[in-house]
Structures are given as C-alpha cells and as structure tokens.
Image (cartoon, helix red, strand yellow):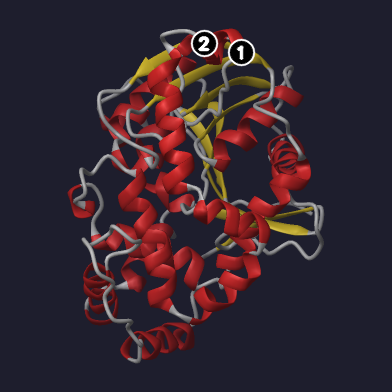
Amino acid sequence: MPPEPFQIEVPDFVLRDLRERLAKTRWPDPLPGEAWERGASLAYVRELCTYWHDEYDWRAQEAALNAYPQFLSTIDDVDIHYWHVRGKGPASMPLMLVHGWPGSIFEFHHLIAPLTDPAAHGGDAADAFDVVIPALPGFGFSSKPKEPGWGPVRIARAFDHLMTHELMYERYGTQGGDWGGVVTSLMAAENTERVIGAHLNFIGARPTPEQARSAEAKPYLEHAAVIQRDEMGYNITQATKPMSLGIAQTDSPAGIAAWIVEKFRTWSDCNGDIESVFTKDQLLTNIMFYWATTSIASAANIYLESRRDALGGWPQIKAPVGVAMFPKELARAPRSWVESRVNLVHWTEMPRGGHFAALEQPALLLEDVRAFFRPLR
C-alpha cells in the first residue's frame, strides 16, 4: 500500500477526560529533603499540572503539528507515523531523524523548516534535505506492536524499509539521539551501501582495556559510574517490568508528567532550572504524545526488547559517522573510544546542551548536521 495521509486529531472526549483526571489528582505528601533530590519535585509537577488543566491549549499545538504533511505506512504489521517534508533546494538529500525516550517526533518539529528550506532561514539552499521523521513503533501515533520482538534491530530494518521501499529513496542519511542514535547506527551498520552517513548526538562507546587504563579515561569512567549509580533506576524498571509502571502512568496524567519531566530536568543542560531550557508548552506537548495515545507502556517496552536483542555493544559502522558531543549528555566518551568502533569523519565538542539536543540547542544541532553532510552530498 502507498503511504496514507494522516492528521493528528485527538478526540474531544480524551481531552475532557484528561482535564477531569488532572482536577482529581491525589497528591502525596512531600518527602524530606530538597526538591528533585528524591525524584520529581512535587511542587513543580503540581504547578505544571495546574497549567495543563487551566491554560495549555492542545488544539493550538495540534494545528502546528499538522502544518507539515504526515503519513502512515504499514510495515511488518505496524503502522509507522511520520512527517515527510520535501526540501527546497537544487539537490535535496533524504534525511531520517529518529527520536528516543522520553522524547517524541515533536523534538524535531521546529527543525523541519530550516532543514527543508535553508535559504528561507539564513542558510544555503544547497544544504536542503527531504526530511522523514518517524515515531518509533509503540510511541506516539505509530501503532503498538502486537507481538514481541520489536527491539532496535527490527525497528532499524523497518525504518530502512520505509526509506527504500515506501518512499523509494536509493540512498539517505540518518540522525538520532538516545534510541534514535541506536536505531540509526544499526541502519548504517547493516546498510552501508544505502546510508550516506549517520549523524549522532548519542553514542555508547566503551573503552578497550588499554584505553580504560589511560589517564584520558578517568573523568569519563567517573561520569559513567555516577550515571549508573544515580540515573539507571528507570532503565532497570522499564527493561524488566514495563507494564507494572505503565498501568499507573496510563491512568494518571500527573504520574506520567512526573516520570517524564524529571528526566527532562536531570538530563538537560538547565542547571536545575528546567524552564530555562524548555517551556511548559514544550514539556506538555511532548507528554501528550504519550498521554493521548496511551503509549507510555508500549514505549517503555523498547527497553525490555533491546535486552532480548543482545546487541553486545555499539555496532561497527563503515559508513561515515559524525558525532555532536553535548557536555551534559548521559553517554559521554572521548573521540579515541568512538574512532575504534566507527568510521568517524566529523566530531564536534559542543559548548552547551544535554540529552535533548534538538529541543535544547536546535541552532547548534542544525549547523552540525549541515556541516557533517555537506561533503557527503
């Protein structure tokens, strides 16, 4: 079947139910200690939920999301939802951008215009891309897999099929962070002849024993130990019992907001002030991709499925790779570790930014993507 045009249209009863649930939220007593010290800040989540109930306008956000052409393509019995926007330039390059958790395709929404029409946004028309921005299976408005096995490997093959068989691109580039970095790296590793290059703002490079003993390794290994100690609880839960938590979050908008917003604060370069980087509207629109579609459990399931994929480390990539290393990214590595696994041709140490690069530092990410692909066109 050819791609089917699609528009995001959340039913009115879903929005009414959301407001009723927000109004009836049962809040816990605060725990002793500083705000955010033991998870989400009760005061901030209450403030955000009050805004969600009283002021947030989903219909305005929905209209903005629907301003670009969207489609559904059924691949391996899963409906993949995606934006597909043609570039305005002499030779637009096909580029797939892939999000992660707890993000959504919304992270890339405001980059569509400068990527597809750079001349209208202070750039060079020669840098134009045809952009394809798919929602991972089980996330957002993509459908939920009905059988086990939809880990990063299967997703990578489905997304390659989307580019080559549904959209008929012979060659294409990729960009991704978090799970998007994993999926697009697998695409590049398996399809060297088709992937022009892979731009990553997340890469899980591990040192060799010799590299781990070097003086260069010490700060990176210390950082990794802190992340493992303080930030991996969510990962263990979602990789072992995703449904137990998913039932509660599907029932409670405050619960889903607390789980996601805490990650946006902790993993971003916001110095503890989440609204210095993200607006309430941005936070809530991203959350709506999980709430309105009841996809918080199916999205978390990628963690369990990835364990079953048993990847055994980052894939070896022969296609050209570019890395934008943001200083507050969870997975940090020196260039030497990355070069030992991939065909690294481009490396940028960013001055600021964290895990959600497309939302936090869109201008920096945009220019780095353009710079990486420019010599590969």
Q: Residues within 10 Å of mark 2 (few under 14, many from 20)?
A: few
State the residue position of label 2.
213
For the residue marked with disc 1, what is the amino acid?
Answer: Pro
The answer to whether 171 is drawn above or below residue 208 in the figure is: below
The answer to whether 223 is drawn above or below residue 51 in the figure is: above
Residue at disc 2, secondary structure: loop
For the residue marked with disc 2, what is the amino acid?
Answer: Arg
User: Where in the figure is residue 107, as x and y percent of width and height?
Assistant: 41, 48
The answer to whether 263 is drawn above or below residue 179 in the figure is: below
> Do the CB atoms of the residues marked 1 and 2 lie less than 8 Å apart?
yes
User: Where in the figure is residue 27, as x and y percent of width and height?
Assistant: 32, 83
Residue located 48% across and 51% down the image = 105
State the residue position of label 1.
209
Residue located 26% across and 52% down the image = 278
Q: Is residue 283 left or right of residue 246?
A: left
Q: Residues within 10 Å of mark 1 (few under 14, many from 20)?
A: few
User: Where in the figure is residue 139, as x and y percent of width and height?
Assistant: 58, 59
Q: Quadrant of residue 33?
A: bottom left
User: Where in the figure is residue 353, as x and y percent of width and height?
Assistant: 30, 34
Would residue 75 be visible to someone looking at this image?
yes
Number of numbered tags placed on the structure image? 2
Q: Could you tell me which quadrant the N terminus lies in?
A: bottom right
Q: Is residue 320 left or right of residue 267?
A: right
- Residue sitting nearer the eye, 359 or 261: 261
Q: Quadrant of residue 189?
A: top right
Would residue 377 be visible to someone looking at this image?
no
Q: Quadrant of residue 137?
A: bottom right
The answer to whether 100 is drawn above or below residue 55 in the figure is: above
